[in-house]
Image (cartoon, helix red, strand yellow):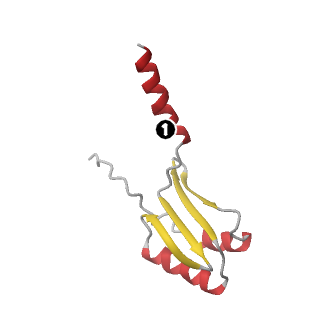
């Protein structure tokens, strides 16, 4: 019985504490150094253009929530750049990588 409680605690810990963004992008001097997850081409183009005009370092993470998408930035990304990226983020056109079964 104790092992069931330990397994349940491990699963709850994994669901709550582990960082699981659907998109993670790292920037260095305004250029995209690395990305992980689905990065729509138009959004990538817009972010690259923002980085060319105002170079910055940092990281962008996109999380999917029930109410929509949440963008989080590292502290190195200036507030003006954060707002410009939020303005070009495709909220309606952004697709997650999870494949859910369609009911119909």
Q: Is residue 61 above or below residue 83?
A: above
**Residue 85, picture quadrant:** bottom right
Side of 48 relative to 41 (left or right): right
SS category of the residue bearing label 1: helix
Position of 53 relative to 25 (above/below): below
Query: Which residue is situated farthest in the top direction here?
Result: 1
Residue labelled with disc 1: 14
102 or 69, which is in the foreground? 69
Query: Quick one: label 1, few (<14), some, or many (20+) residues within 10 Å?
Result: few
Name the residue nearer the viewer: 66 or 7.
7
Q: Looking at the picture, how far across and down is residue 34, in whole percent?
A: 49, 70
Closest to the observer, 75 or 64:
75
Looking at the image, which residue is at 67% across and 69% down? 82
Residue lying at the far bottom of the rendered structure? 53
Residue in view at x 53 percent, y 49 percent: 19
Q: Position of residue 35 (x, y in %)?
A: 47, 68
Q: How many marks?
A: 1
Residue 61, x across and y down, in percent: 56, 60
**Residue sitting at 45 percent across and 64 percent down?**
36
Q: Residue furthest right?
A: 79
Tell me where residue 11 appears, x and y as whole percent. Answer: 45, 32
Please give the name of the residue rendered at 55% of the width and 41% of the height, measured from the top-left corner.
17
User: In the rendered image, which quarter contains the N terminus?
Assistant: top left
């Amino acid at each position: 019985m104790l092992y069931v409680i330990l397994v349940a605690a491990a699963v709850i810990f994994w669901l709550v504490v582990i960082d699981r963004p659907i998109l993670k992008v790292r920037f260095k001097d305004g250029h995209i150094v690395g990305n992980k997850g689905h990065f729509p081409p138009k959004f990538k183009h817009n972010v690259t253009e923002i980085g060319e005009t105002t170079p910055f370092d940092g990281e962008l993470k996109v999380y999917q929530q029930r109410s929509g998408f949440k963008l989080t930035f590292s502290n190195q990304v200036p507030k003006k750049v954060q707002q410009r990226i939020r303005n070009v983020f495709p909220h309606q056109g952004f697709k997650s990588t999870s494949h859910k079964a369609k009911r119909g």
